[in-house]
Image (tube, rainbow, N blue to C red):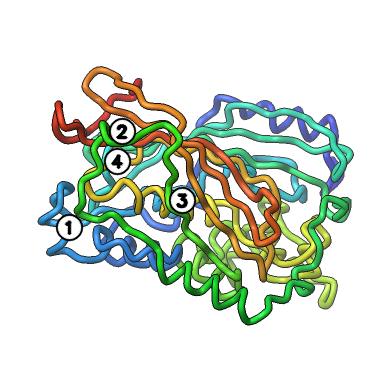
Amino acid sequence: MAWGEITDDALAAAAELIGQPLRRSRMQWIETATKDAIKHFAWGIGDNNPLWFDTDYAEASPTGSLVAPPCILYAIDSTIVAPKLPGVQWIYAGTDFTWYDHIRVDDTFRVEAELTNQEEKSGRRFSRWVLQTGEVRYYTSNGNHIATATGHCARTPRGEGVSSDGNEDARNVRYVPEELADIEQQVLGEKRRGASLLYWENVSIGDSVPAVVKGPLSIADILAWYSATQGALHYGGAHGDALRYRRRHDDYHINPATGAKDAAGRGHLEAATARDVGMGAAYDVGPQRISWAQHMLSNWIGDHGFLHRLNVSVRRPNLVGDTIWWRGTVTGKREQDTVKLIDIDVEARNQKDKLSALGKAVVALPSQADGPVPLPLRPDS
């Protein structure tokens, strides 16, 4: 098999893993949602909800203890299920999350993962690419099934990407002072419902979920995400660990300056490598952007609500210098047994009003008639 190329033989070798249990040690940054791990994840996405930080506040809330932002699951397992295809770039395409209960402080997890599907595709940016889909199931140490995530990864040949879809170099982004002042005011004016109750009966179709604003994106923002969720883990680690990983897996990028094997994820931090994979400039990490949607929804539902589902498709790179507005619109209300559910369309747009990501969410809310959200939810809710 040719390194870095998508061939029939390479696809066949990957397809043999569909339905097989996969090892996940290289996809896990933490095993236990310690107080520090929760704090670091929340810092990494810029979410200051006291449910994640303040023990006294959380213990007096409906959760009864410190809980973690739901997307901390990315630190427990990355949801990247992209086996085989040596040397072929992977680009995160989205996650379908379902949560059944809160992730509580000191919950320890094990995961089960498998490749569930592999589709060959072609398009304007890449003449031949592959979408790999995998399912990750999260269990606490006492056997409770807390959540399931279906992750989607695009596998693309390196050096073939073109930037004709408008992924212009973000160094051309320049804000006037008035624009920056407005962005800063929106970021600092973020609304959080907190302890105030939002009842299911008081939500109407067409209601807006207040925006969460992130940006202008900096390299420091991306490094904060890495620190919170993965470090260099997904790229083979560092030092000798990285060398051993790259010898086993052929997952690397050649550094043009040194000729040495380097991390395949350099494009998130380095514009030249990002252009090599068709991004145009250094860019954020897909799960990072998805976690900002969770931030928005957690703000809106408050301490009494519960985020049940979040399915997001990442549509275009969010380049260094870009600003993202995550917004939501209520599209439905329904009852399932004793659970009162709200359906929401969510989307992220940048400062040029370009669609960055979109998806759907389901939240459970307390009811004036039936009381609090009955947790844990059943898998069929």
Q: Does the rendering let one see residue 76? A: no
- The first of marks 1 and 3 along the sequence is 1
Which residue is pictured at 80% across the width and 38% down the height? 129
Q: Which residue is mark 4?
A: 306
* x 12%, y 56%: residue: 59
Q: Earlier in the sequence, mark 1 or mark 2?
A: 1
The residue indicated by pointer 1 is: 58
Q: Amino acid at mark 1?
A: Ala
Residue type pointed to by label 3? Tyr
Tell me the distance, in whole angstroms, between the alpha carbons under discs 1 and 3: 22 Å
* Mark 2 / mark 3, whichever is N-terminal: 3
Q: Given this view, does label 1 or label 3 mark the residue nearer the observer?
A: 1
The residue at 35%/53% (across/down) is: 299
x%, y% of residue 101?
27, 38
Q: Residues within 10 Å of mark 1 (few under 14, many from 20)?
A: some
Residue 290 in picture, x, y percent from top left: 52, 50
Q: Assess whether mark 3 and mark 2 are in contact (beta carbons under 8 angstroms).
A: no
Give amino acid for label 2. Answer: His
Of labels 4 and 3, earlier in sequence is 3
Residue 287 is situated, as x and y percent measured from the top left of the image, at 54, 52
Q: Secondary structure at mark 4?
A: strand
Determine whether label 2 and label 4 are within 8 Å by CB: no
Give the quarter of the figure containing the N terminus.
top right
- Residue identified by numbered label 2: 145
Q: In the picture, residue 55 is in which quadrant? A: bottom left
Give the alpha-carbon distance from disc 2 to disc 3, as whole Å.
16 Å
Residue 248: numbered disc: none
Q: Is residue 145 visible?
A: yes
Local secondary structure at mark 1: helix
Which residue position is annotated with label 3?
A: 74
Quadrant of the image containing the C terminus: top left
Does dot 2 land on a helix, a strand or a loop?
strand
